[in-house]
Image: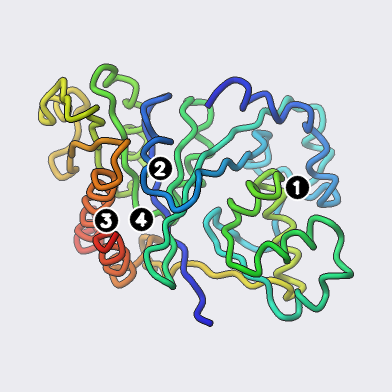
Amino acid sequence: MSNPIPVKIVVAGGFAVGKTTFVTSISDIDPLTTEAAMTKVSEGVDNLGDALGKKSTTVAMDFGRVALSEELILYLFGTPGQDRFHFMWDELVRGAIGACVVVDTSRVEDCFAAVDYMERSGVPFIVAINAFDGMLRHHPEDVREALDIPAHVPVVVTDCRHRAAVRDTLVALVRHAMMMAHQPA
Amino acid sequence: MSDDALNAGAAFRVRPYLLTGGRTRSVVDLPIEALVRSTPMGHRALENLSHERRDIVSLCAEPQSVAEISARLNIHLQVARVLVGDLVQAEQVAIHTASTDTTTRRPDLQLLEKVLDGLQAL
């Protein structure tokens, strides 16, 4: 029995922009939700006493799973939307192939934080404009300009509800990651 | 994510770590996507394991990520990680992760090519 290998792609973007829909469209399973306690744990608390008395919140992350072959499993993790959960993003991008930042062109500004984060973290990322039923309110290059996306970062059009569109978006990201691996930034 | 999802954990502010004896860190480095598979030794020990550990060993007869263990057994991610770490040390589960590039710590080119092939075949 061969041992499968896991790989991970992060699906980022503003609140309610279609990240979970994106994951659902391609996942083999109904997306699952994992909850992490947002204590100071990530800063190195190593016993319960330190965690007591601190206000802790739970952050929920939706994710899906796609079997790419018998020995390759792709996990797609949606980032928690709010800025205060960025501590969780570090965990998500660590070792990831890359990230797709989903953009709703009616609220382009909602994904500033995600684009900014991905740029700083150095993870390969692409920007995916969610076009409902092919309705594109803005030209991709206008979105690139509005978000100040560097020239080497692909800006693609997707439709979070359609499996083929989501697959093509993931293909674009993996190709970009391969190019980045050839010529590290 | 709704506010309900945010608040759902409020009742468990302290309790999650009771399962781990108060420990919040795993003894092994476990990425969220690391695949966990139970070992023959784990299966043999099944009857003697406490509830959550037994659940993990049972669930991982088929490989599951740390995230899936957390989601399917409804335990916090950090708790799942500590418990899996213990099971790894006891050799009751084994961990499988991707081969990464030594400098970028990301999947290497060879692996990316396989991912691309897999996606294109979907």
Q: Residue furthest right?
A: B48
Graded by Cα atoms within 10 Å as few (under 14), some (14 to 19) or many (20 or more), the crowding at tag 3 reads many
- Amino acid residing under circle 1: Asp
For disc 2, the marked residue is A23
Give the secondary structure at mark 1.
loop
The kind of residue tagged 2 is: Val
Q: Earlier in the sequence, mark 4 or mark 1?
A: 1
Question: Do residues under tags 4 and 3 come within 8 Å of each other at their CB atoms?
Answer: yes
Chain of the residue that carries numbered disc 3 in the rendered image:
A
Q: Say which quarter of the image contains residue A19.
A: top left
Q: Which residue is mark 4?
A: A97
Q: Residue at x 26, y 56 (%)?
A: A174
Question: Which is more foreground, mark 3 or mark 2?
Answer: 2
Marks 1 and 2, the one that precedes in the sequence: 2
CA distance separating discs 3 and 2: 16 Å
Q: Tell me which amino acid carries mark 4.
A: Ile
Q: Nearer the viewer, mark 3 or mark 1?
A: 3
Looking at the image, residue A141 sits to the left or right of residue A91; the answer is left
Going by the numbered disc 3, the residue's amino acid type is Val
